[in-house]
Image (cartoon, rainbow, N blue to C red):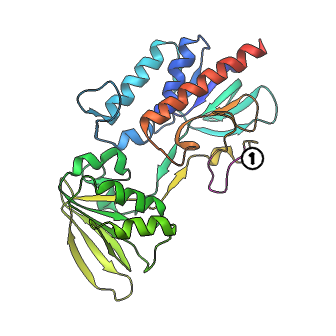
């Protein structure tokens, strides 16, 4: 039987940091990295806000370093997806690639994926002018014209943040009213750098090697137009990677995020969580890493009390 003291699910900064700390604590952890590993950093080009790197580092390179560090401290990494979990009894059970694994404790760090517009041209230019995170990438758009797509609080927050760098920020929304809270609407509408384009959808992202503009469609009139811009920030929401937790016993909120109790603890004793799979506010590599550290330390304490 594949049995472990600690199993970590997820290979972004949260999961890998948990692996580093758990490995150093000699817990002999196994980490399920998934067939598509590394989380959102794998879609990021230059990372300039992660402590310890004077010069920018590529997101995939940062993940590779974390993987190597976790392995150095004895974390076993399996690049498979956890398909199902059962936390109704101990030891906990997980299934990956049709194999059953047992664990005395588990850290869930599977992250959340940004929702995209679903355009081939958008996917081609992610990291080359297309982004889903203004705090991550806003710095690279100094004195440039950028567009934010969305109408909720997140879109307003992204637009306001980008005014620190961009020469002009245009919010494009497919409706004629915003979904954002009144206070966020007012802040955005009162900012002289932010303009609004209503009843409009992005049909195509223009540019070969980097974003040069957008092809737009007025959803009421059907009119097609082009809009010059050097950056596109998609702010239409995130989807937590928690489908495999359905029926597991772990409590999720109405949007599917893991509910958290007292730092990293879930509703089930011995099951912990870290990173964007529960964090709907910060969504940064450094905050995810910090959460992974806390989860590993909490798991270590829990396991020590079991001994």
**Percent x, y of residue 112:** 51, 47
Up-down relation of residue 55 to residue 117 (above or below): above
**Percent x, y of residue 203:** 32, 72
Left or right? Give the position of 301 relative to 275: right
Left or right? Give the position of 9 relative to 288: right
Q: Residue furthest bottom?
A: 221
Name the residue located 23 percent from the left edge and 56 percent from the top edge. Answer: 166
Characterize the magenta stretch by its predominant secondary structure: loop
Name the residue located 52 percent from the left edge and 67 percent from the top edge. Answer: 181
Q: Residue furthest right?
A: 89
Magenta residues span 251-257
Left or right? Give the position of 77 relative to 82: left
Tag 1's secondary structure?
Answer: loop
Up-down relation of residue 253 to residue 27 (above or below): below
**Percent x, y of residue 196:** 33, 73
In which quadrant of the rendered view does residue 130 lie?
Answer: bottom left
Question: Number of labelled discs?
Answer: 1
Left or right? Give the position of 306 relative to 223: right
Name the residue located 71 percent from the left edge and 17 percent from the top edge. Answer: 303
The reply to whether the magenta stretch includes residue 164 is: no
**Percent x, y of residue 207:** 19, 60
Front-most of residues 35 and 240: 240
Residue 307 visible from this viewpoint: yes
In which quadrant of the rendered view does residue 244 lie?
Answer: top right
Name the residue located 24 percent from the left edge and 52 percent from the top edge. Answer: 165
């Amino acid at each position: 039987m594949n049995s472990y003291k600690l199993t970590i699910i997820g290979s972004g900064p949260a999961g890998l940091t948990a692996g580093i700390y758990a490995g150093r604590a000699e817990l002999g952890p196994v980490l399920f990295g998934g067939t598509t590993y590394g989380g959102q950093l794998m879609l990021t080009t230059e990372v300039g806000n992660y402590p310890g790197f004077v010069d920018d580092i590529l997101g995939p390179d940062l993940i590779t370093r974390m993987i190597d560090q976790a392995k150095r401290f004895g974390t076993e990494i399996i690049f498979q997806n956890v398909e199902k979990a059962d936390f109704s009894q101990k030891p906990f059970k997980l299934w990956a690639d049709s194999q059953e694994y047992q664990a005395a404790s588990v850290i869930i760090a599977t992250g959340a994926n940004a929702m995209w517009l679903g355009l081939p041209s958008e996917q081609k230019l992610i990291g080359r002018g297309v982004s889903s995170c203004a705090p991550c990438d806003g710095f690279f758009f100094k004195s440039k014209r950028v567009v934010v797509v969305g109408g909720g609080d997140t879109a307003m927050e992204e637009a306001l943040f980008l005014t620190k760098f961009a020469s002009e920020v245009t919010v494009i929304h497919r409706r004629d009213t915003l979904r954002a809270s009144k206070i966020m609407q007012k802040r955005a509408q009162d900012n002289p750098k932010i303009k609004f384009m209503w009843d409009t959808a992005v049909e195509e992202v223009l540019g070969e090697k980097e974003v040069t503009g957008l092809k737009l469609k007025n959803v009421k009139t059907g009119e097609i137009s082009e809009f010059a811009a050097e950056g596109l920030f998609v702010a239409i929401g995130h989807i937590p990677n928690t489908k495999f937790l359905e029926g597991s016993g772990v409590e999720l909120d109405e949007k599917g995020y893991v509910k958290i109790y007292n730092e990293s603890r879930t509703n089930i004793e011995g099951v912990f969580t870290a990173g964007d799979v529960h964090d709907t506010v910060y969504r940064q590599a450094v905050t995810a890493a910090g959460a992974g550290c806390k989860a590993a330390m909490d798991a270590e304490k829990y396991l020590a009390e079991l001994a």
